[in-house]
């Protein structure tokens, strides 16, 4: 290799180095280390970690709290994802139309996304306070009794779902709004000339044309629903009786409260595998049915 | 019987008037062209007829029915958009059938009509493709198909050919006209291309700044333009408009001795089509400025006094720049316009001088 070419290569690698170091140190190494750790026991005091094979995975299968967290998470995902997407689409279609105060509405819908999650969770905790929280105050007007929303096993997860939908819908609305503005207005006019109503036009034209956005939003919504931890820490700490323990929160608990790092690594590997499978499935299944412009 | 009647229609956006007191009628099974430069209000007028915009004032009748307050779908019209407005995710067949499906036309009827339209437009092989897989001309045909499958008595076209190349445009122009006559559709056709208007129209509505400048059949528009603007807009190369000035014994072309009128008249413009000017003979003296060879003919630009005059002569011109030539014309080919208002002045034509255009003398002799 000539000295000039060598220098070009050297410069190239030097420019890549900072990003490569950061990626390796904070993404690739931890990912690989996590997978390896899941095959070892947790080191405790005098006992160093030893190779245990699939023991951690076996323990996980027999762990009722893991199944509870998985069940909770599936319920949480199945309700937040469709609700969030439907609400985002509805708001986007609404603020895309010609209505008074449109910029204000757009801003109002987007505000929850901008607020820090911890602050949001705290505000909602106040809403749910039994007796004098906003929810009970409003219900009290109709003569309904006070209710411990976050303290009840049956309502706590639903409370978290409401917060998540409220928080994410505005964020996804922005993507839908951008996609809606890409649809030429002549399409609506052409359909109007043929006598297509609003709903018919939405069903036959707008919605299919929004499918690329829907896929993008769907994948993000799935990832978000498996990634939730901060709301739970602030609002319920997984309680009552693990009613609001989701997978990532359980991993956090196992890893940083119980310091069972090997088991936490095992749970992480399972969560990642689950997410990868979901994303892949969505792409393979939906991508072929989507029209990209 | 008039199929479309636009009566005193105006459209204002705030203080801006896009269309101002426009009135015209389109006869049944005729092709009416709305012609004008961009921003003249022709597309807005079409959108008002379609019901895509609300009129600020005036009434619109289609098939004898007042449709001014009806939504587009109830006006019994179809429309072809400049951008074609095809649904990108639907196949050609689905695009063409869109309207029939909305109206829940029976399936047998749908496939029969689709077959007919596809063969009419030569789209049989493309029915399963998506619009993005088609050429511009094919997309144009699909848009046309979507309009004619509705079998509405009126079809509106908003610059349908402006996205095509020149050769295809000439082809489609002919095709659309043939289709319109074959199916007996009343068509309103918007264009800024005067050659499209001349070759296709039964009637041309020439618009300028939101108003009707002249409404006439193409031959009439060409032969007797009502204003200097209409005169310049129709014909390639456009009509010469020369400033006239009163001279010693009559009116002359400004800056020359070429006598046009035997009486001195102030504030007058002379219109003269390049194809009506002949070279040679005993006409007025001129100097060649530039020659533009076009194959079948040559456009020669000559200086007469302070004015420039183009003439169209067949074949390749032999005159080099700066050569002295003589230009002649027949007096009946002169058009006079008022310099201030631009309106046609036929009253002064009677004073047309018999001596400047040598051809007059030849004809008399």
Image (cartoon, helix red, strand yellow):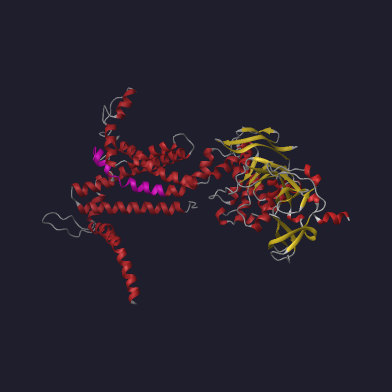
- Quarter of the image with the C terminus of chain B is bottom right
Chief secondary structure of the magenta portion: helix
Q: Nearer the viewer, residue A155 or A136?
A: A136
Q: Note whether residue B213 is visible.
A: yes
Query: Which residue occupies the extreme bottom position in the image?
Result: A2
Residue B337: x and y in percent read 72, 45
Please state the extent of the stretch shown in magenta in the rendering: A216-241
Q: Is residue A18 above or below residue B107?
A: below
Residue B113: x and y in percent read 66, 47
**Residue A241, located in which quarter of the rendered image?**
top left
Image side of residue B151 versus residue A111, left or right: right
Image side of residue B281 versus residue B172, left or right: right
Image side of residue A34 versus residue A189, left or right: left
Image side of residue B72 versus residue A159, left or right: right
Query: Which residue occupies the extreme front position in the image?
Result: B248
Residue at figure coordinates x 41%, y 44% from the top left: A174
**Residue B216, located in which quarter of the rendered image?**
top right
Residue A27: x and y in percent read 28, 57
Question: Does residue A225 belong to the magenta stretch?
Answer: yes
Residue at figure coordinates x 65%, y 57% from the top left: B168
Q: Note whether residue B187 is visible.
A: no
Residue A102: x and y in percent read 44, 37
Residue at figure coordinates x 28%, y 26% from the top left: A146
């Amino acid at each position: 290799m000539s000295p000039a070419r060598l220098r070009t290569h050297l410069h190239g690698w030097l420019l890549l180095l900072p990003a490569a170091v950061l990626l390796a140190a904070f993404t690739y190494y931890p990912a690989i280390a996590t997978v390896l750790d899941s095959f070892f026991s947790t080191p405790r005091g005098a006992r160093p970690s030893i190779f245990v094979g699939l023991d951690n995975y076996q323990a996980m299968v027999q762990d009722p709290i893991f199944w509870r967290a998985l069940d909770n998470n599936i319920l949480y995902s199945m309700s937040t994802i469709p609700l969030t997407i439907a609400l985002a689409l509805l708001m986007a279609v609404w603020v895309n139309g010609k209505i008074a105060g449109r910029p204000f509405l757009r801003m109002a819908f987007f505000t929850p996304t901008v607020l820090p999650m911890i602050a949001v969770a705290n505000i909602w905790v106040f809403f749910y306070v039994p007796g004098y929280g906003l929810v009970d105050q409003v219900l009290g007007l109709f003569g309904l009794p006070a209710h411990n929303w976050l303290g009840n096993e049956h309502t706590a997860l639903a409370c978290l779902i409401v917060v998540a939908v409220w928080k994410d819908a505005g964020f996804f609305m922005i993507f839908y709004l951008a996609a809606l503005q890409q649809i030429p207005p002549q399409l609506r006019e052409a359909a109007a000339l043929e006598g297509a109503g609003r709903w018919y036009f939405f069903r036959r034209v707008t919605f299919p044309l929004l499918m690329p956005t829907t896929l993008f939003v769907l994948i993000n919504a799935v990832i978000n629903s498996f990634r939730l931890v901060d709301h739970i820490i602030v609002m319920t700490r997984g309680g009552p009786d693990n009613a609001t323990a989701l997978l990532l929160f359980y991993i956090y608990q196992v890893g940083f409260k119980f310091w069972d790092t090997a088991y936490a690594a095992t749970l992480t590997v399972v969560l990642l595998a689950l997410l990868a499978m979901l994303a892949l499935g969505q792409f393979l299944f939906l991508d072929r049915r989507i029209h990209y412009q | 019987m008039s199929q479309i009647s636009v009566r005193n229609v105006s459209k204002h956006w705030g203080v801006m008037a896009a269309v101002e007191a426009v009135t015209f009628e389109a006869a049944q099974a005729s092709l009416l062209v709305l012609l004008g430069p961009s921003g003249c209000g022709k597309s807005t007028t079409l959108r008002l007829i379609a019901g895509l915009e609300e009129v600020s004032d005036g009434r619109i009748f289609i098939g004898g029915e007042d449709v001014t307050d009806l939504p587009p779908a109830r006006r019994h019209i179809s429309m072809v958009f400049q951008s074609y407005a095809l649904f990108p995710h639907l196949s050609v067949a689905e695009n063409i059938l869109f309207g029939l499906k909305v109206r829940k036309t029976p399936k047998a009827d749908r496939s029969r009509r689709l077959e007919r339209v596809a063969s009419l437009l030569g789209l049989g092989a493309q029915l399963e493709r998506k619009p993005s897989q088609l050429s511009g001309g094919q997309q144009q045909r699909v848009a046309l198909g979507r309009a004619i499958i509705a079998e509405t008595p009126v079809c509106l076209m908003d610059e349908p050919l402006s996205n095509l190349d020149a050769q295809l445009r000439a082809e489609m122009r002919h095709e659309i006209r043939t289709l319109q006559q074959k199916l007996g559709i009343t068509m309103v056709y918007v264009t800024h291309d005067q050659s499209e208007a001349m070759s296709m129209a039964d009637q041309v509505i020439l618009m300028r700044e939101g108003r009707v400048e002249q409404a006439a059949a193409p031959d009439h528009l060409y032969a007797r333009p009502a204003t200097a603007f209409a005169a310049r807009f129709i014909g390639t190369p456009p009509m010469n408009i020369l400033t006239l000035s009163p001279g010693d014994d009559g009116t002359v072309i400004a800056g020359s001795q070429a006598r046009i009128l035997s009486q001195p008249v102030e504030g007058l413009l002379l219109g003269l089509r390049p194809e009506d000017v002949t070279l040679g003979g005993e006409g007025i003296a001129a100097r060649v400025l530039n020659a533009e060879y076009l194959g079948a003919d040559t456009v020669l630009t000559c200086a007469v006094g302070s004015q420039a005059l183009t003439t169209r002569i067949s074949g390749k011109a032999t005159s080099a720049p700066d050569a002295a030539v003589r230009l002649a014309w027949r007096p009946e080919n002169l058009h006079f316009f008022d310099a201030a208002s631009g309106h046609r002045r036929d009253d002064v034509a009677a004073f047309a001088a018999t001596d400047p255009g040598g051809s007059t003398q030849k004809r008399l002799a």
